Amino acid sequence: MAYDVPVDKLPQDVHDRNKAIESLREELNAIDFYDQRMHVVVDEELKKIIAHNRDEEKEHAAMLIKWLRKNDPVFDKEFDEHDQV
């Protein structure tokens, strides 16, 4: 977890948000890796397994985004505004 300031100066909600953001970053990377692999695999059974794994990571990412929206009113507001477009 990357911090730009002394960790002991930060309140717990900032630590929690940092963990959620870092986890989301990891989930998005996993989605990308699985998607790339799925497109080059020849075996159809393996392709389906990798696609399934990719989609599981999408569920995890969505759960993290939901948590961020619930715990960060500005983040939630931005999603609401962009949902209207």
Image (cartoon, rainbow, N blue to C red):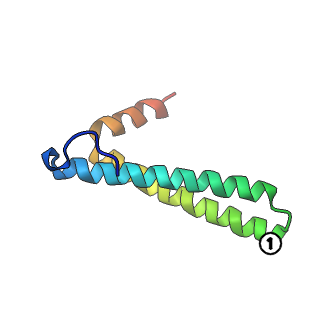
Q: Residue at x 30, y 35 (%)?
A: 74
The number of numbered discs placed on residues in the rendered structure image is 1
Q: Can you give x and y, in whole percent of width and height, for residue 60 in the image?
A: 48, 60
Residue denoted by label 1? 45
Extreme residue toward the top, this view? 85
Q: Is residue 19 left or right of residue 32?
A: left
Picture quarter containing residue 72? Answer: top left
Q: Can you give x and y, in whole percent of width and height, for residue 28 in the image?
A: 53, 50
Q: Is residue 17 left or right of residue 44?
A: left
Which of the two residues, 71 or 2, is positioned nearer the viewer here? Answer: 2
Q: Residue at x 40, y 51 (%)?
A: 22
Q: Is residue 4 left or right of residue 66?
A: left
Asked if residue 5 is positioned above or below residue 59 in the image, the reply reads above
Asked if residue 35 is positioned above or below residue 56 in the image, the reply reads above
Q: Can you give x and y, in whole percent of width and height, for residue 26 in the image?
A: 49, 54
Q: Residues within 10 Å of mark 1 (few under 14, many from 20)?
A: few
Extreme residue toward the right, this view? 42
Which of the two residues, 10 or 68, is positioned nearer the viewer here? Answer: 10
- Residue type for callout 1: Glu
Extreme residue toward the bottom, this view? 45
Q: Can you give x and y, in whole percent of width and height, for residue 51 in the image?
A: 69, 62
Q: Residue at x 24, y 51 (%)?
A: 15
Asked if residue 26 is positioned above or below residue 50 in the image, the reply reads above
Under circle 1, the secondary element is: helix
Which of the two residues, 70 or 8, is positioned nearer the viewer here? Answer: 8
Q: Residue at x 55, y 60 (%)?
A: 57
Which of the two residues, 13 or 29, is positioned nearer the viewer here? Answer: 29
